[in-house]
Image (spheres, helix red, strand yellow):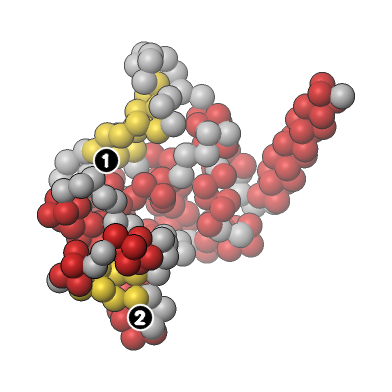
Amino acid sequence: MKHYNCFLLLLLILFFQTKTASIFAQNVEFSDVNRAIVKYFESKKLNAIASENPEIFEAIKFYFKESFEVEMIDCESCQIDFDEFFNFDLYDMYEHESKRLSEEVYSFDYKEKYRVTLLSESEIAASLEGKAPRELLTFIPSRPLPEWESTGNEDKDYETYKTKLRKWSLDFPEKYKELFTSGEVKIVSIDNFLAADASRQNSILNNSGGYIIKD
């Protein structure tokens, strides 16, 4: 029974991969896309971009597939299986964009298996004839607001949070302005946040994507 269930699971995986490939086969080569791209773009929209604005299509591909470098943690000289990296280990550049720096590369470990190095914003602009990452992000639904990460050092934690929030606001300026007028999120001053007891702080932080902490 165990082997039978595994066989069924394998068939389902193959079915969905084939189905996804067939959707894009009409206009866009399946090798051009990965699961991260498929997650953010419906086939009709992506095919329209590829047909009507191929330069933007190439820029989107570059962002999701080439705006970083990757190597195996345990074997720097080993070749990367990008099909596995994108479609099974599900690397999504968009989810890590807040880590990108303006002038320097930034490296981090992904799934304890890969070391990913993000190109700097200036390197990307050079590769895309002046287009900054935030220009590409206008084609993608805004990623979730950054969250407060507590290390026990409140000053450092706030500086880290502010840096991420500032980057988010630059990437999605219209959405950021809208949050302050829509009542969609709770705006909390840093003084009130730090003065609150642990229970109140946890109540704020547990509302993922529902708060902004400011000066």
Q: How far from the left and from the top, in percent, is residue 190?
A: 18, 68
Residue 119: image tag = 1
Vertical placement of residue 57 versus 194, above or below: above
Q: Quadrant of the C terminus?
A: bottom left
Which amino acid is tagged 1? Leu
Percent across and percent down for residue 145 are 36, 63
Q: Nearer the viewer, residue 78 or 189?
A: 189
Q: Residue visible at 26% across and 50% down?
A: 150
**How far, Cα to Cα, is label 2 from label 1?**
30 Å
Task: Sort mark 2 into few (<14), some (14-19) or many (20+) by Cα contacts within 10 Å.
Answer: few
Of 182 and 59, the residue lying toward us: 182
Report whether 183 appears left or right of 19. Answer: left
Instruction: Judge by depth and name the residue closer to the eye, 99 or 32.
Output: 99
The image shows residue 142, relative to residue 5, as above or below, that is below
Q: Residue at x 31, y 73 (%)?
A: 176
> Which residue appears farthest toward the left when viewing the image?
155
**Badge 2 amino acid:** Glu
* Residue positioned 46% across, 44% down in the render: 92
The dot on residue 178 is 2
Find residue 186 and report its horizontal and vertical position in percent.
Answer: 34, 76
Image quarter where the N terminus lies is top right
Q: Dot 1, how many residues are within 10 Å of its Cα: few (below 14), some (14-19), or many (20+)?
A: many
Please tell me in which quadrant of the rendered image residue 72 appears.
top left
Mark 2 falls on what kind of element? helix
Q: Nearer the viewer, mark 2 or mark 1?
A: 2
Residue 7, visible in the rendered structure: no
Q: Is residue 59 visible?
A: yes
